Image (spheres, grey):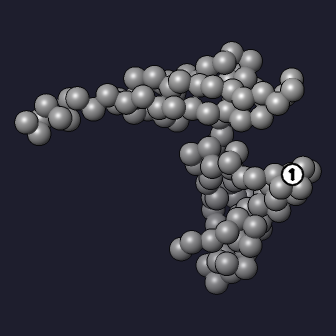
Amino acid sequence: EEANWLTLTDDISEHIGDGFDAVICLGNSFAHMMDTTGDQKEQKIALSNFERCVRPGGLLLIDHRNFDHIVDNGSTPAKSIYYNCKHTTDIRTSILYVGTQPAIVTMDYLIDMSDLQDKES
């Protein structure tokens, strides 16, 4: 089922019932929501919709990168429990500043799949 986080409860109302045991938002996707109004209105709506989908006593889990650490250190760890890919060799991180504030963090994933190519030969 596909749904928009901003209209989530309307989009999947027939599936919610008393709520899900868990709502899990993985892959750093929440951090990619646009903040078009500058007050995180969209993020607050999405969180409210997530909350309405979780049963009382249920779990809401949102996975995200530690952007404070990335900005402070200028790099992204290539290995972690969230990104455990044996093919990732490095994550090259660049940070675009507007004035003195970080505005965009770009992560380029470098992968080595030569072992797979060797198997295909």
Residue closer to the observer: 77 or 84: 77
Residue closer to the observer: 14 or 67: 67
Image location of residue 114, percent across then percent down: 23, 29
Position of 95 relative to 7 (above/below): above
In the image, is 39 to the left or to the right of 92?
right
Q: Which residue is mark 1?
A: 40
Residue drawn at point x = 20 percent, y = 35 percent? 116
In the image, is 97 to the left or to the right of 20?
right
Image location of residue 27, percent across then percent down: 56, 45
Q: Secondary structure at mark 1?
A: loop
Residue drawn at point x = 11 percent, y = 39 percent? 120
Type of the residue with mark 1: Gln
Residue 2 visible in image: yes
The quarter holding residue 119 reads: top left
Image location of residue 107, percent across then percent down: 57, 32
Residue drawn at point x = 70 percent, y = 71 percent? 8
Image location of residue 12, percent across then percent down: 65, 77
**Which residue sits furthest left?**
121
**Which residue sits furthest front?**
99
Q: How many discs appear?
A: 1
Residue drawn at point x = 86 percent, y = 23 percent? 100
